[in-house]
Image: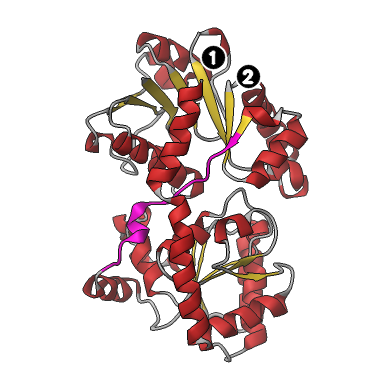
């Protein structure tokens, strides 16, 4: 088969949607090498290297008008390139498919990660909601099949857009296989020194937005005072909510206990940081990942923690129990006290940490790149 992807996120996104795209493309190219894969990318960057695979090639805007209006090319005009290459299946990796693709004879699949803007519209501006709703709903209605990355997302797609459940298949995502590899001690120490990381620390990874709940983590740190002894290293960035978090940190004297790694000169200069190549080492250096998100489509940092053999605190709601299984420490994300209690336990209870680490590694085997590629390929073959 010839399978094409919307590869904008693979090349341009450094967070969840980008990681999902890169990992899935690489996994399919590795485990199903008999097929040819085409990456439809408005812009190429160093975030992904298609040349690493002999069966992967890029499709980019070629004409003057397509180069000038790359967004229109991605959302519509790319159909000409797909037909020229005789593509069999087009996979929209992040909620979208080209307008009118259903009239080309090319079968289409779309991955829906979450419908958080439908559940919590107050966290989005009105114009964005209208744009997202139009694109997501169009894709759900016109794609031949929908992949949801969790049972939670499948239920939301069926509920909000009235899509028959038989048109939706849950295919859990994986994460970069590098997280499953034990980073050598010397390399971890190099990373620690390069980024000036503390000897012990908790780790937060994710966009700094309201539903990710970083403020309540900081409140838990304040409630603990010095009981946990561990500062918090933050990987991620944000805007107004980040400023709200930083205001709280300043008001409560937490400046030395919350480290925004993205703001450091080391991170700004590091290709390993920009491409996330250094993240497995940072995870493995940490004493635990804190991720009490209020709502997720999947919660990739939880899986990255399990692969890294470090304990993780996450929420007992949304899809997060699907991701964490029996291995995570669950809290009510609205309860600062429960988050603080979990942090104390991870800092002091060695037997609990050992048990969580062992269970985490076992649970993570349900989300291997090969298993995820197998599930997605099964969807393609049914189209």
Decide: marks 1, 2 in contact (CB < 8 A)? yes
Sequence-wise first label, 1 or 2: 1
State the residue at coordinates (46%, 79%): 354
Q: Which mark is residue 142?
A: 2
State the residue at coordinates (30%, 55%): 271
Q: Secondary structure at mark 1?
A: helix
Rendered location of residue 139, percent (x, y): 62, 25
State the residue at coordinates (64%, 53%): 319
Write down the residue under mark 1.
101
Separation of disc 1 and disc 2 at Cα? Answer: 8 Å
In this rendered view, identify the residue nearer to me: 190 or 28. 28
Is residue 202 something that shows in the picture?
A: no
Identify whether 105 is placed above or below 167. above
Q: Looking at the rendering, which quadrant does residue 193 occupy?
A: bottom left
Q: Considering the whole magenta stretch, tell me its main secondary structure.
A: loop
Rendered location of residue 264, percent (x, y): 40, 67
Rendered location of residue 159, percent (x, y): 77, 36
The stretch of residues the image draws in magenta is 169-183
**Is 48 placed left or right of 76 in the picture?**
left
Residue 180 is covered by the magenta coloring: yes
């Amino acid at each position: 088969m010839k399978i094409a992807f919307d590869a904008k996120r693979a090349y341009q996104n450094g967070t969840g949607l980008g990681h999902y795209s890169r990992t899935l493309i690489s996994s399919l190219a590795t485990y199903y090498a008999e097929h040819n894969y085409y990456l439809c990318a408005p812009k190429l960057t160093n975030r992904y290297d298609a040349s690493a695979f002999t069966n992967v090639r890029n499709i980019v805007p070629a004409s003057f008008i397509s180069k000038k209006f790359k967004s229109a090319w991605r959302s519509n005009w790319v159909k000409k390139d797909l037909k020229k290459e005789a593509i069999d299946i087009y996979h929209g990796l992040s909620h979208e498919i080209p307008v009118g693709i259903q009239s080309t004879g090319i079968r289409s699949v779309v991955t829906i990660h979450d419908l958080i803007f439908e559940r919590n519209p107050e966290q989005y501006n009105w114009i964005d909601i209208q744009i997202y709703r139009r694109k997501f709903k169009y894709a759900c209605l016109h794609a031949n099949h929908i992949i949801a990355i969790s049972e939670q997302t499948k239920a939301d797609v069926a509920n909000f857009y009235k899509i028959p459940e038989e048109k939706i298949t849950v295919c859990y995502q994986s994460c970069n296989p590098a997280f499953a590899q034990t980073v050598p001690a010397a390399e971890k120490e190099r990373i620690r020194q390069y980024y000036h990381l503390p000897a012990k620390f908790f780790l937060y990874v994710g966009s700094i937005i309201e539903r990710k709940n970083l403020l309540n983590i900081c409140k838990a740190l304040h409630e603990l005072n010095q009981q946990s002894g561990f500062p918090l290293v933050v990987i991620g960035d944000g805007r107004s909510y980040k400023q709200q978090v930083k205001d709280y940190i300043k008001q409560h004297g937490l400046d030395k206990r919350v480290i925004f790694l993205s703001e450091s000169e080391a991170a700004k200069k590091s290709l390993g940081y920009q491409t996330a190549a250094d993240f497995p080492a940072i995870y493995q250096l940490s004493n635990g990942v804190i991720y009490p998100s209020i709502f997720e489509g999947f919660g990739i940092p939880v899986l990255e923690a399990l692969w890294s053999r470090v304990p993780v605190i996450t929420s007992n709601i949304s899809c997060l129990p699907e991701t964490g299984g029996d291995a995570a420490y669950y809290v009510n994300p609205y309860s600062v006290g429960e988050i603080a209690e979990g942090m104390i336990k991870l800092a002091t209870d060695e037997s609990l940490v050992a048990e969580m680490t062992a269970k985490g590694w076992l649970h993570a085997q349900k989300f291997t790149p090969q298993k995820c590629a197998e599930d997605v390929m099964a969807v393609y073959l049914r189209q």
